[in-house]
Image (cartoon, rainbow, N blue to C red):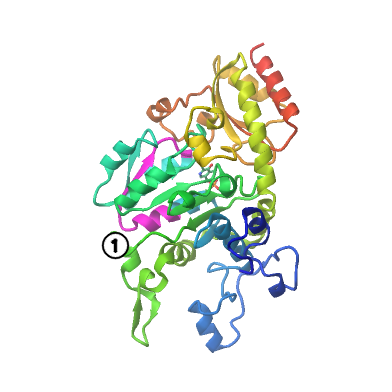
Amino acid sequence: MNILTQDKFDTLRIHAGYKPEENQFASSVPIYQTAAFGLSNTEVANQIVAGQQPGRFDYSRDGNPTVHVYEQRIAALEGGIDAVAVGSGMSAISFAIFNVAEGGGRIIAPTNIYGSTLDEFRNFFPKYGINFDFVDEVNDFDRIKSLIQDDTKAIYVESVANPSTEIADIETLATIAHEAGIPLIVDNTFPTPYLLRPFEYGADIVVYSSTKGINGHGNTLSGLVVDHGQFDWSSGKFPQFTEEEFNLGDEEQGIHESFYSKFGAAAFIKRIRMKYVRLLGSVLGPIDAYFVMLGLETISERLTKQVASTTAIAKFLAANEHVERVYYSGIEADNPLVPKYFPKGVGSVLSFELKGDEKNIAKLIGNVKIFSYIPNIGDAKSLIVNPTRTTHREIPAEIRQKHAMNNQIIRLSIGLEDIDDLIGDLDQALAKAFE
Ligand SMILES: *Cc1c(COP(=O)(O)O)cnc(C)c1O
């Protein structure tokens, strides 16, 4: 990397990880649309497959130059040791959970998380011997401590919950995790690294759906696993990092290695790449990596405007006669977690509870003209959705009740349109919804 790590966020998002002089001085990161790469001669081939030839690749499932620039850029922005890009946010979450709890174990997680994540945690991972202990309140520290057992392998949270925007107290949660010898994994999709970098508060692993605000244009699915490189995987609680791996050593020379002995602080992220991406697939393609990097170049300007517009819309809705309640931590003046973690704002998503019944919901959604009825967030376009019927339909009734997640909840993702037009659009649609 030719960019010094002390460079600031706005410089890194444009330049980190890319060496123009090694790419015909191309201004834009080239798309290496190729499945495989030449190995030169047998001696060089041996070095490439052993990872001893930086900048050389063999097969795009193991690594691709375009995707590699994106991974290096994200690691720099996040302040991590390394990042791995994958085909979607769900892949990133799945790989991180499997990697930390492989072979079985328990994980502590809150119930108010993304619908597919909760579905996976409740109904899919247990079939692989990975069981979850759920808390209804992400910052219920006493309850979290009481749930930690010998085979608990991690605490998993969303930094800003989808769609309630409740904020996790990452610093306290990281301390609790580390006292128990386990890592804290954070889904930081909602804030993006522009608004929050969880490693600064002690998180160990960050996962993203970069489909959302990192890309910012709603055109590509992608995900990321990012490693802080500070967690000690050698305690014995995580044998997958300390047991010998045939692939890592050299049988002929009698060299035996584990992920920990070979990669030390980078054991987790190397294992994500060499086991999960390489063996289960779910790679990010070079064209998709190019699109995300293009979006990433304007992340600061986009988020700054989106936070301002989201705050204005939250205040408008809070004063509207047809709105029962607004959920946007960004306007909670008495919430100490807001200034601590989010001095630049909480993000571009809010939700609110509409008065009336589902007929009014249908009329509201049917009458918006600028907002699009689309189950996504973090787009340049403003989006509206009814979560319990779409993005969060997997969440069972008893959990919905605890988080005021009823059929009257509407989630908005605020884009880059003119703020007066957006408020005007909501104003007229709200009026029509109750005509
Ligand atoms: C969208 C989303 C995901 C899933 O990401 P995909 O890219 O759709 O697979 C995970 N977590 C959160 C918070 C999300 O909003």
Secondary structure beneath dot 1 equals loop
Q: Quadrant of the N terminus?
A: bottom right
Q: Quadrant of residue 304?
A: top right
The residue nearer to you, when weighing 368 against 207, is: 207
Where in the figure is residue 29, as x and y percent of width and height? 70, 64
Q: Is residue 229 above or below residue 311?
A: below
Q: Is residue 279 above or below residue 142?
A: below
For label 1, being within 8 Å of ligand 1 is answered no
Where in the figure is residue 7, as x and y percent of width and height? 62, 60
The residue nearer to you, when weighing 22 against 246, is: 22
Q: Quadrant of the C terminus?
A: top right
Membership of 109 in magenta stretch: yes
Where in the figure is residue 85, as x and y percent of width and height? 55, 58
The residue nearer to you, when weighing 332 against 100, is: 332
Q: Would residue 153 be visible to someone looking at this image?
A: no
What residue is shown at x 71% (from left), y 38% (from top)? 416
Amino acid type at circle 1 is Ser
Residue hosting label 1: 235
Span colored in magenta: 95-115
Q: Residue furthest top?
A: 435
Where in the figure is residue 356, as x and y percent of width and height? 55, 14
